[in-house]
């Protein structure tokens, strides 16, 4: 493991998506902090993850557990995997700790119970909401909305591409590196406004999952010409 | 060719996308009518298409040309490939002729000059706008927004899936048959509101095309489980 790798915190990281990302990044040699509203919940998720790594004979993984604010302060780069209803509250809590950092927003603006119906927020997208709340001192980059947690929890190799949206190209490029470290292809998808596309697509994929009995994702085609 | 196949009109069908679809459906044995604002423009496009079919040695194709309203009246099922700025006017023109039929809306709400930026309309999507204008007597089904005209113009075989959105399952299924006849896979994508996802994705694909120098599309993955 290189000392030069950034420390990654996953805020609200105790769910399937958060622990799936944590697992992949830890396995790739990153120091990962699982954040949650309580240290206890975070520690339970981190302990589970260490147990899985142990079972698989993967040694030297570095997974810590903290409350969300402490996690955001300790990390170089943060990802956030919270339900839409908790996005704003979590962001207000960690706002100051994110200054000068990248926030990878994985929030999908699902409105239960009709989660298979696209219902984008007035601001256009959850990614845009995050950028508006955090202001220019934080680079919000949206990603991973179309990856099935089911597949993320499996081993390496995952046939789902990740479209990465954010207003700064360098920030998108940093996130694309983390997408690749997690075993997927990442693509520059344009400004944070374009997060509307990937967020809306999640509801369509939920519909497809119900209709076809699968855990669908997407792949970008037509790259060869 | 079976007499049972529906007659398809492509309103505003003289562009690359419209003639690309016309070519594929004609080749699959459908009677196709290219519609345009003037009969002259429609006839030019139809003549070009017949010429191409001739060159390729494909015989017996049935491609006619009409003004949009006449085309809508003569067809069993209509597709519409007009710029967003002409969507409403075209729909008002053909509204009565569409009653009891399916309209395949291919409209993408691009707002020049920033076509690589998602700018969805207040109503949520162009598909929803069409359904609102046409009312319940017309089944609006949105499709083909993510297919590169460049690839459509080539021969058979096209590595791009088509997400099909509309409020009625039977209407979506009829359109999926036409997607397959055109050489692609079609997927039920949910209600017409979900058209927001495919429409937004078009701007992301335009961004990817510029960034990576390609004509990108999408494929649904993860269907096997």
Image (cartoon, coloured by chain):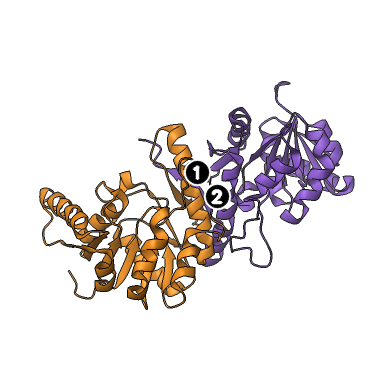
Chain colours: A orange, B purple
On screen, A81 above or below A7? Answer: above
Q: Within the image, what quadrant is residue B7 found in?
A: top right
Relative horizontal placement of residue A76, taking residue B136 as reference (left or right): left
Q: Which mark is residue A204?
A: 1
Report helix, strand or loop for mark 1: helix
Residue A147, position as x, y percentages in the image? 38, 50
- Judging by the rendered image, the residue that carries numbered circle 2 is B197
Residue B80, position as x, y percentages in the image? 73, 44
Residue A183, position as x, y percentages in the image? 31, 56
Residue A109, position as x, y percentages in the image? 47, 52
On screen, A138 above or below A32? Answer: below
Front one among A7 and A133? A133
Residue at mark 1 to residue at mark 2: CA–CA distance: 7 Å
Does residue B70 appear anywhere in the picture?
yes
Say whether mark 2 and mark 1 are on the same chain: no
Q: Within the image, what quadrant is residue B186 found in?
A: top right
Residue at 34% x, 63% y is A79
Residue at 37% x, 78% y is A100
């Amino acid at each position: 493991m290189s000392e030069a790798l950034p420390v990654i915190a996953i805020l609200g990281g105790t769910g399937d998506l958060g622990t799936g990302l944590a697992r992949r990044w830890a396995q790739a040699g990153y120091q990962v902090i699982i954040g949650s509203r309580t240290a206890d919940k975070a520690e339970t998720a981190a302990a589970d993850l260490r147990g899985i790594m142990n079972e698989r004979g993967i040694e030297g993984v570095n997974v810590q557990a903290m409350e969300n604010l402490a996690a955001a302060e300790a990390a170089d780069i943060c990802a956030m995997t919270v339900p839409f209803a908790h996005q704003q509250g979590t962001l207000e809590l960690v706002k100051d700790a994110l200054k000068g950092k990248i926030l990878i927003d994985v929030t999908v603006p699902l409105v239960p119970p009709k989660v298979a119906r696209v219902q984008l927020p007035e601001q256009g997208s959850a990614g845009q909401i995050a950028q508006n709340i955090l202001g220019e001192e934080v680079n919000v980059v949206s990603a991973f909305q179309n990856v099935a947690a089911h597949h993320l929890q499996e081993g390496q190799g995952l046939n789902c591409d990740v479209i990465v949206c954010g207003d700064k190209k360098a920030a998108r490029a940093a996130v694309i590196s983390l997408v690749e470290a997690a075993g997927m292809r990442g693509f520059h998808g344009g400004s944070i406004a374009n997060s509307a596309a990937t967020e809306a697509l999640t509801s369509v994929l939920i519909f497809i999952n119900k209709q076809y009995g699968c855990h669908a994702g997407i792949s970008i085609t037509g790259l060869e010409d």
